[in-house]
Amino acid sequence: MTIILLLVATLATIALWWLSHQRLMEKPWLETGPAEAFRGVTAGGMPAEKIALGVFLAVVSSLFALFASAYSMRMHMASDWRSLPLPWLLWPNTIVLFLSSLAMGWAQIAVRRGDAASLRKALLAGGASAFLFLVGQLMAWQQLAEGGFYLAANPANAFFYLLTALHGLHLLGGLVAWGRTIVRTGRSTAARWMTLSVDLCALYWHFMLLVWLAILALLLHG
Amino acid sequence: MGEATAKPLDGRGHAEVPEDDLYHATSWWTKYVFSQDAKVIALQYSATALAAGFVALVLSWLMRLQLGFPDSLSIIDQNQYYQVITMHGMIMVVYLLTALLLGGFGNYLIPLMVGARDMAFPYLNMLSYWTYLLAVLVLMSSFFVPGGPTGAGWTLYPPQAILSGTPGRDAGIVLMLVSLIIFIIGFTMGGLNYVVTVLQGRARGMTMMRLPLTVWGIFTASVMALLAFPALFVGAVMLLFDRLLGTSFFMPAIVEMGQPLGYSGGSPILFQHMFWFFGHPEVYIVALPAFGIVSDLISTHARRNIFGYRMMVWAIVIIGFLSFAVWAHHMYVSGMHPYFGFFFATTTLIIAVPTALKVYNWVLTLWRGDIHLTVPMLFALGFIVTFVNGGLTGLFLGNAVLDVPLSDTMFVVAHFHMVMGVAPILVIFGAIYHWYPKATGRMMHEAMGKFHFWVTFIGSYAIFFPLHYLGLMGVPRRYHAMGEMSDIPLSTGELNALVSVAAFIVGFAQLVFVFNLIWSLRHGAAAGGNPWRATTLEWQTPETPPGHGNWGRELPVVYRWAYDYSVPGAMQDFLPQNQPPSAQATRSAAP
Ligand code: HEM
Ligand SMILES: [Cu+2]
């Protein structure tokens, strides 16, 4: 449970940092007065969608950290663990996902420049490569199954399929949001909205890349 | 109310939704059924949760009939007894308490109390309810499948949860796990809303330190639930894999009736870690909203500012953090390194400190207050007593050495029913009596309410207090009948019969409550906008019940904290949060 506890500690630090900006030490019963006096601490500023995504990413981190905890505990709890040979396809897949993330970063630049043509191109590239990654993952599964590494044969296999499936499902969810964004580029959407949509997609993409790298590290570790 | 939301909002936080993205109900269906209005969703959540709770109540009667009169009234056999306790426990904890406190009260109170027009993401909010309903239906469907619901116990421990000796092994356990997974997905949608609305939807001037404690409690509980429910999700998914796909995450090598099963090497302890990493925070996910609500009930009905507001906030936050570091106190009897036992016993006892602090502050708020013994106040007082009682037995169970003999006895059943069964339920009742006038415009019938309180309060003690003694005498938990256990005195049978009678009386008193809920809808006295003369924003809405968009044309502006009761020198004995400071500077004495 070390991994999840480390995550909780990290999140707790962020929460404490945020709380420390909320005037927790002031005496609210003495502070009668107009709102303007407390501008710094009233709600506002960042769009709600961005905060929501941030909170959601914390939830997803918790999910994967728990799986990682289970993984490392199960590995040492019995002597039946046989690490499986990672299919070579995972490496090109990783590069594809990295490029996908990069394309999303490009989209962010394009949307800020107001360059509609490159925005569309960048988004299409980002989505298509994420899709390609998913196909690649399925093929990696096939490689493993052909090699006789079935789900139930060993806990290492079971974790492999479970973790990759879960990551893939999350990416698939991201592709839904991506689809909505790309539809928006076809319409005349306010620039502020377009930027927000692209930013959210990009953030999610980078995050899914990080999660994938963490999974990969876990798989390499044992 | 169309024009209220059509007005361009003041360009902050939640209000940044452009006009055409704001939700307008256009038909009867979108207004009352597929509604995106948090208030309607709140009522849907509450009604569904209460209905599920009623099923769990009926199940508790079946258990009590069996335990009280094992020889004469055999309505359920051993297997059914397991199924009944499992469904009773899980429904009560997850589908009733969690859903009602966060989905019900959270949805109703957060937007109103922080001065928002609605939740940050109304559509997601609606989806959250329907996902929850689906989870309930999937769970309930397990009563009707061949083999019936699972009898694994609400803790669902493998290996027995999925072995063929356990009732409901075929379909019941699968439906239970699937239902939990759906519930968690639905909750995540709701939880994101609760958190973001508190962060981003607050009215002008509503700083975090001006929030009513109800919002602090629900907010912190939502954050905790968002991080803790994934543990149950992981456990459920992996157990489902073991059950359906033959993996060995949790299942060790096992021989079942002479047949070796295909499992090997899995660890049941791993499941326990996952379950309790969720399970312990869950206790506080239920308790923190109750703490918050009780603070507001006490302050309002004693006409006194809450004692030590800042300490109350800190305590909520500290409890929230600490509750992630105590889960293994549920695993003392599973065997662990003595140092771990020591560690978890210590953290468990430390968490008692902020909790006790809250109790002191409630009592000090009452001290010299102008206590009105209204129905909500009675329930709040009942909560304090019950919670202290349950908390004290928690000190016994939190110590590894004492827990070993007490574990799996009725003492444990008594403890957790006091602390997370009766106590939060009392708060929920108090809260319903308190906010019903806002939601419906009518008061609930007072005499019926008082009858409901006294029977429930005294009756709950009659049910659960004797269980402590039964536990000390060695009566085990989850036993259908004692049979030939010679070390347990025969007199325990009489005590058990008495408990069962009390359980039926309490159960039927709930019918009075349900009747009151329905009766008052038409016949209750008109409540007006602010019958309790309370300060918080939900009582200051232009309409009662609040219309769509909550606030009419103007969002409220907040000038003071939530507890300006009996302010010296003020004209009224309460100053609403949105009342501007008057010329004569009035200050409440700092506690
Ligand atoms: C009138 C109210 C209630 C009565 C009469 C009642 C009665 C019981 C009984 C007889 C048992 C089984 C004890 C055993 O043999 O182990 C039980 C178990 C349980 N109850 Fe209740 N209960 C009530 C309300 C609640 C509430 C409000 C909660 C919410 C937290 C709750 C949560 C549980 C849990 C978690 C279990 C354990 C199930 C298990 O062992 O798997 N109960 N209850
Ligand atoms: Cu606990």
Image (spheres, grey):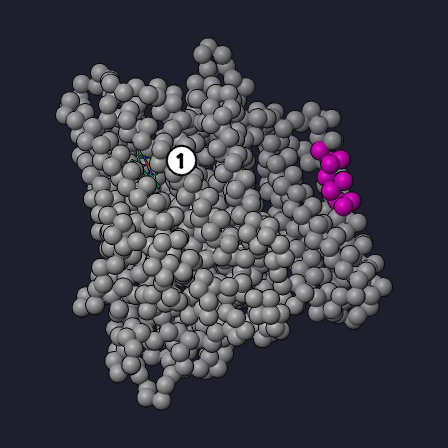
Q: Amino acid at mark 1?
A: Val
Say whether residue B433 is magenta: no
The number of callouts visible is: 1
Vertical order, A27 against B223 (above or below)? below
Vertical placement of B160 versus A207: above or below?
above
Residue B285 visible here: no
Asked if ligand 1 lies within 8 A of label 1, the reply is no
In-front residue for pair B38/A166: B38
Residue on which disc 1 sits: B55
Image position, residue B464 (x, y; %): 23, 38
Q: Residues within 10 Å of mark 1 (few under 14, many from 20)?
A: some
For residue B123, side relative to residue B547 (left or right): right
Ligand 1 location (quadrant): top left
Q: Nearer the viewer, residue B520 or A178?
A: B520
Along the line of sight, which residue is nearer the eye, B22 or B402? B22
Q: Residue at x 48, y 48 (%)?
A: B45
State the extent of the magenta-drawn residues as a range.
A131-141
Quadrant where the image shows the C terminus of chain B: bottom left
Q: Picture coordinates of residue A22 (x, y %)?
A: 44, 71
